[in-house]
Image: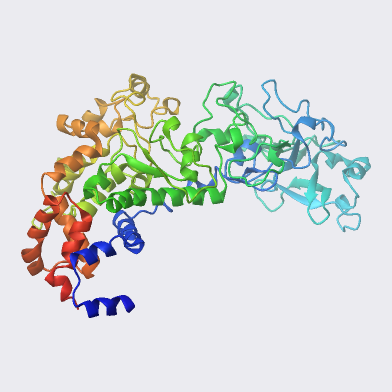
Amino acid sequence: MEEYKTFQAKGSVTADDVRKMMGDESFYARMREFHRALLRSNINSSVQANGDFRVSGTPLSFAGNNSNSLRGGQSQRCDGEIEQDNCKAKPQDAHQDNSTPPNCRDPQGVPLPVSYDYDPNYYQCRLLDVNSTAPELKFADCNALKADATYGKYVNFCDNRFLSSANKSVGYLCLPDPSKNTTNVLVPSPATGVITAWVHPTPETNPSLKRLDRCGFTMAQRSGINGTWVPQQGCVQREGYVNTAVQPYWSTTTDTVKVCAVEAQNRATNPYTGESCETARFNGDRTCGCGDKMRRCEIAEVHTARVTAFNEEPLFITDAVVRNDEPYFNILTTRRSFVNGTLSEFFRQRQGVGVFSIKSPADTATLPAVTYTSANQWSEYTRDTTHSGVLTTPAFLYRFPTQRARVNEFYEAFLCKHFAPAADASLPPPEDACNRENNLAKRCGCNYCHATIEPTGAHWGRFAERSALFLSPDQFPRLDVKCRDCAIAGDTNCGGECTQYVMQAFDGDGANSLGLLKTYLYRTADEEKNIEGGPQTLVQRMMETGDLERCTVKRIWNEFLGRAMTAEEQRLYLQTLSQDFAKNNHSLKGLIQQVVMSDAYRRID
């Protein structure tokens, strides 16, 4: 009210007054929120990864589905009571045959199981208790069970489990679960003596579960491949832990860290198969681990911090353009960007493997070195030549995950145009062959919109869909001969290296395009130029039409008058404001000044 009374006493608001207001931080905060809404800068729901790359607990270990392939059960941790490299000094159980693991690690240093539990998905595990009413449970521990003439036959299925209330490991008897129709039919093998397995009485009927062997330390090879492991069915096979003074990158302490031995490893490749540990497959490979300072893994707080930082990056770009009163459409073309500690460490340390698919936007040596804990310190830098303003930020690419979605947002946000078929548009009859046209730019009915969407979307053709990865021509050539040969041979997986390429043919064009980078499928020569030109060329072309200026005028009008331009206001103001905006070097502050000094703004109710 004081400010209002001051201007009321003054009798008028001048252009200088407006300019002064636009120098206040509250104005820049408003412009940040304006652009947040315009760009829908929020990828909170765009990057999930199901938490499979997160670690938690003590010892630190994976908390997701991946422990199925590592240990034989979902969200199963290692043995927190047995130190991996001292595993023989504290074996799991002395009462069982072959209870001491042959080695703590294999010849390549990969941690081997040091203990095991029976999986409750197959077994019913009940606590041994001398006061139990069940005779097979009336024992103090597994050694007492073993010594019994009647129930000693179950000794191989006596499982020591950690009981938190007692703060120690206690004996459980684990027998096939009688409540499940897959396990309640199993019978002991051998029929007499100490049981080593449970088998289906009529395996010739091909039941879903034919046999459950006693658990042990040995893991089978997957498909017979050395350097791969498969946990034994019905068993959770655990490695031990290691203590390390090397802190995870997110740590704020100097305390010794207890980490599961698999996650504590730091290898670039599987020493047996040569497969990379720098891809999403690392968390299912026992040889890989989380890497140096656990850089390949994350915790929930890290994921939240990264998503927040990616959401803010385009707003720092727009803020710099508005604050410096640069030509407004620099927000779509500038190579300038910003990183805080979260993003600086993410790019420089190659973190987030498997969660985010993003190529570093500049040589990591040129990125500002901001410490991870400095989440509020943002530093400016220049991205490489592949980048174009907010249109190539991870926030934009993840928020709009396909080329078509990216086109749609560009048209809506910056051209004020929407894709809709013409009023007189019609679909062909179902039997028309045109309905089977795979190229949507030509398919009858679809071509009303896609004849524009597809060529325009090609500008993002070097950015992978559902990620923010730039598909460098050096790494992703237009035609990959290896992928083509795999596809022709019927190998659509091709070692997992051809996910960005056409590997199956659905029509004549597809058959001729096997091994082609997907984004080049059905492209004309002009559209291929759009791919190589990137979003920059799209912005340059749109600058020649005047649509960018007219849309920005409408957006600013709506922001400051609280409603869209009426048809009459468009007739009176749109052309003049657009032309003045262009003449004034596309100064957004200049446009805002004109809008709020206009008669329409002064008489707003």
- How far across and down, in percent of the image, does residue 9 sit? 23, 80
- How far across and down, in percent of the image, does residue 403 sit? 28, 42
Image vertical order of residue 8 relative to residue 251, above or below:
below
Q: Residue furthest front?
A: 10
- How far across and down, in percent of the image, does residue 309 sit? 44, 49
Looking at the image, residue 179 sits to the left or right of residue 553; the answer is: right
| Residue at the image point whose x is 49% and y is 32% from the top | 279
Quarter where residue 254 is shown = top right
Looking at the image, residue 391 sits to the left or right of residue 432; the answer is: right
Quarter where residue 533 is shown = top left
Question: Which of 163/533 is in front?
Answer: 533
Question: Which of 578/114 is in front?
Answer: 578
**How many marks can you see?**
0
Quarter where residue 272 is shown = top right
Image vertical order of residue 362 relative to residue 305, above or below:
above
- Identify the image quadrant of the N terminus: bottom left
